[in-house]
Image: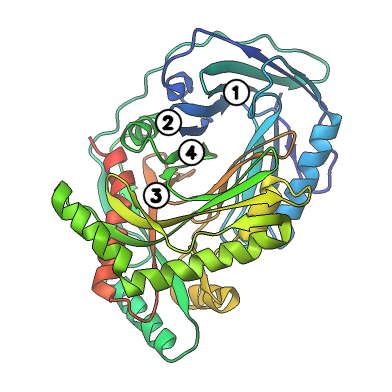
Amino acid sequence: MSLSEPVGSQAPHLVIRSQRVDSVSAQLMDHLPAEGALAWVRRGDGHVGWGVAARLDVAGSNRFQDAVAWWQDLVAAAVVRDEVGVPGSGLVCFGSFGFTDDDPGELVVPEVIVGRRAGTTWVTTVSPASSLAAPPDLVVQEPAPVHDVAFADGARSGTDWSSIVADAIKRITAGELDKVVLARDLIAIAEQPIDLRWPLRRLVSAYPNCWTFAVDGLIGATPELLVRREKGLITSRVLAGTIRRTGDDAHDLALAASLARSSKDLEEHEFAVRSVADALEPHCTSMNVPETPFVLHLPNVMHLATDVAGVAANGASALGLAAALHPSAAVCGTPTDLARDLIGEIEGMTRGRFSGPVGWMDAAGDGEWCIALRCGQADPADPRRMRIFAGAGIVAGSDPAAELAETNAKLVPMRDALGD
């Protein structure tokens, strides 16, 4: 039974049961069906799900508050039989939200969830209150390979986008704002319908330290943890400042050292860290904000990174904290309002759910929300097509050609995942 709930309607009454299982593939993605894949996987742990037991679609300026309220009502009405008792077992929702208030978002409660954490694997079934579903037989399902993918310019060509960056640099230099993040897209067109499980498996394999996700046709492998809340501890990983890897280890170490000394990248990173720390401070009794970033090494790029941590001061859920953080300087700019206005004026495209929060949450309000980066959105009108996205932070010291090269590097994960 699937229930799609408009804002303001009564949340459904559900029965949830989580049981330990042994006969599960080493790769959780192996069990996903061809349609309706939901996923959140990192280093082999996480959740995958399918079916729709309940769903909320939201948009507008109150979208996060509406989603939090709906989830609280659903939790209050649910009957949960959790025989596992680890974070992520029991009642769980997946969700993603647009970058702007006008971009739609959703929370989805699957009918079936397969989860793994620290060696414990389980299956959760979600049913209407009038029934109790039996655990399904878990079988490995092979995706259809994706072949013959061509890539075309999206809203703007690379040359046009570089011109926009140059315009933004002039405005920043003139003192209108400190930083703005500008995004661009490409259109991937395959000969046959894209089986989303194919790129998901490749992303999990190639980027095990990233959070690989799938929610309502939005898939990707993001390196940026917007916020995690677990048993009173709040953490956030801030990324800003990027350099492309060459594949030569010695050269990459030298590049990492240059990134750590780059005044332009350190300035961009400082804006992002400050925005996260300021947003989390009202929700924490104490915080740890490192003074200097470290260099995060990924297969295609390296980032300046800072892990911010705090002790929760109130009952704000993981989604409530994500709402307080979005949009951070890492995806919007500084000051936020001015940067958001400039994005709307010159970026020239609708981001949709790119650079918005994506993640999961349990009945206690614990969970993880990342920023939807290194991702693509399947075209619901044409299963052969997908938009893929990348962005770059622009500050006074930015160079348009270098920023275009940075976005090209950030497009590599999705381009490779969709390739032969």
Q: Position of residue 146 (x, y in %)?
A: 29, 33
Nearer to us in this view, 263 or 75: 263
Q: Residue at x 68, y 39 (%)?
A: 366
Look at the numbered disc 3 and give the secondary structure of its residue.
loop
Mark 1 = which residue? 113
Q: Position of residue 75 (x, y in %)?
A: 80, 33
Amino acid on which the number 2 mark rests in the picture: Arg
Mark 2 = which residue? 43
Q: Position of residue 24 (x, y in %)?
A: 48, 12
- In primary-sequence order, the first of circles 4 and 3 is 4
Residue 11 shows up from this direction: no
Q: Residue at x 27, y 51 (%)?
A: 151
Nearer to us in this view, 50 or 172: 172
**Dot label at residue 213:** 4
Mark 3 = which residue? 374
Quadrant of the frame with the N terminus: top right
* Image quarter of residue 268: bottom left
- In primary-sequence order, the first of circles 3 and 1 is 1
Badge 4 crowding class, 10 Å Cα cut-off, few under 14, some 14 to 19, many 20 or more, is: many
Amino acid on which the number 1 mark rests in the picture: Ile
- In primary-sequence order, the first of circles 3 and 2 is 2
Residue 124 shows up from this direction: yes
Nearer to us in this view, 192 or 235: 235
- In primary-sequence order, the first of circles 4 and 2 is 2
- In primary-sequence order, the first of circles 2 and 1 is 2
